[in-house]
Structures are given as structure tokens and as C-alpha cells.
Image: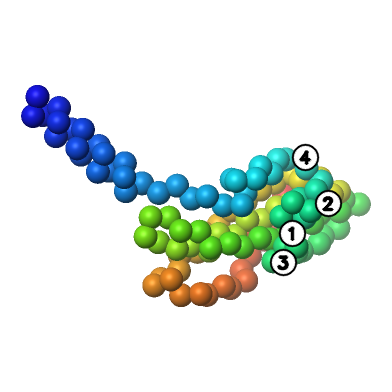
């Protein structure tokens, strides 16, 4: 019986430390196939955007940044949405840890290759 209670206490300790990040993209769903207009209407103007033309295909990447708290850590989460002819075809996310909750935002490429 003591063993069972010890297991329950240890599990509750570990589970209470787990953090789940809530971002604008988990609270409001964005789906492959959405149009660029519907995404920008839902999430607002992006932080940054890149536009490419490749073999008569128009590619657009838009970047959103947001601060995300997970447990006792703060991250800057960059979400990159790639559109082919104005239709969403790829979603990427990258985290940058903010030591001591400093407000540092840098612009850096998530993936330089075009899908």
C-alpha cells in the first residue's frame, strides 16, 4: 500500500511540472489549404514575409512571432507559414529560449530552402 501511494505521489509531482504551451496557432486552428487572406485576417499582419517566384509558381512565406511561457521558461516562438499560389502548404515552428526573460527578438531564417 505504501508503494502504491509513493507511486501516486511521484506521478503527481512529475505531471504537475509538465508545461503545455498555448499559442495563437493552438488556440485558433490554422489548416493546410487555408488561403493567405483568411490567415492574415485571422492572425493579423505577419512579423515578416518573403516572396518567391519559381517555375511560374508563386511562393510566399509569412512569419509570426510570439512569447510563450512553458513552466518557468520563456521562449520566442516563430511560426512560418508557406503558401503556394496563395494556398497554405507548410507550417514550421522554431523556438528561441530567452534567458532571464530578456526581450530579445532577432530575425533569422527558419529554413532557407523552398519546399
Q: Which residue is mark 4?
A: 33
Asked whether 87 or 101 is in front, the reply is 101
C-alpha span from label 4 to label 2: 12 Å
Q: Which residue is mark 2?
A: 37
Q: Secondary structure at mark 2?
A: helix
Marks 1 and 4 in Cβ contact (< 8 Å): no
Q: Secondary structure at mark 3?
A: strand
* Numbered badge on residue 48: 3
Single out the mark in the foreground, 1 or 2. 1
**Coordinates of residue 64 in the picture (x, y in percent):** 66, 60
Q: Quadrant of residue 6?
A: top left
C-alpha span from label 3 to label 1: 12 Å
C-alpha span from label 1 to label 2: 10 Å
Q: Secondary structure at mark 1?
A: loop
* Disc 3 crowd, CA 10 A, few/some/many (<14, 14-19, 20+): few
Q: Note whether 12 is above or below 71 in the view shown.
A: above
Single out the mark in the foreground, 4 or 2. 2
Q: Which residue is mark 1?
A: 44
Asked whether 108 or 43 is in front, the reply is 43
* Disc 2 crowd, CA 10 A, few/some/many (<14, 14-19, 20+): few
Marks 4 and 2 in Cβ contact (< 8 Å): no
C-alpha span from label 4 to label 3: 21 Å
Residue 67 at least partly seen? yes
Marks 3 and 1 in Cβ contact (< 8 Å): no
Instruction: Name the residue rendered at 61%, 63% in the picture.
Output: 65
C-alpha span from label 1 to label 4: 18 Å
Q: Secondary structure at mark 4?
A: loop
Q: Note whether 54 is above or below 96 in the view shown.
A: above
Amino acid at each position: 500500500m505504501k508503494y502504491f501511494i509513493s507511486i501516486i505521489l511521484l506521478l503527481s509531482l512529475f505531471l504537475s511540472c509538465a508545461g503545455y504551451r498555448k499559442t495563437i496557432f493552438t488556440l485558433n486552428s490554422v489548416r493546410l489549404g487555408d488561403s493567405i487572406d483568411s490567415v492574415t485576417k485571422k492572425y493579423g499582419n505577419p512579423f515578416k514575409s518573403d516572396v518567391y517566384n519559381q517555375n511560374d509558381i508563386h511562393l510566399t512565406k509569412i512569419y509570426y512571432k510570439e512569447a510563450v511561457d512553458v513552466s518557468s521558461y520563456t521562449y520566442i516562438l516563430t511560426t512560418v507559414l508557406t503558401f503556394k499560389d496563395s494556398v497554405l502548404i507548410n507550417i514550421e515552428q522554431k523556438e528561441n529560449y530567452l534567458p532571464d526573460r530578456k526581450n530579445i527578438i532577432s530575425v533569422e531564417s527558419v529554413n532557407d530552402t523552398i519546399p
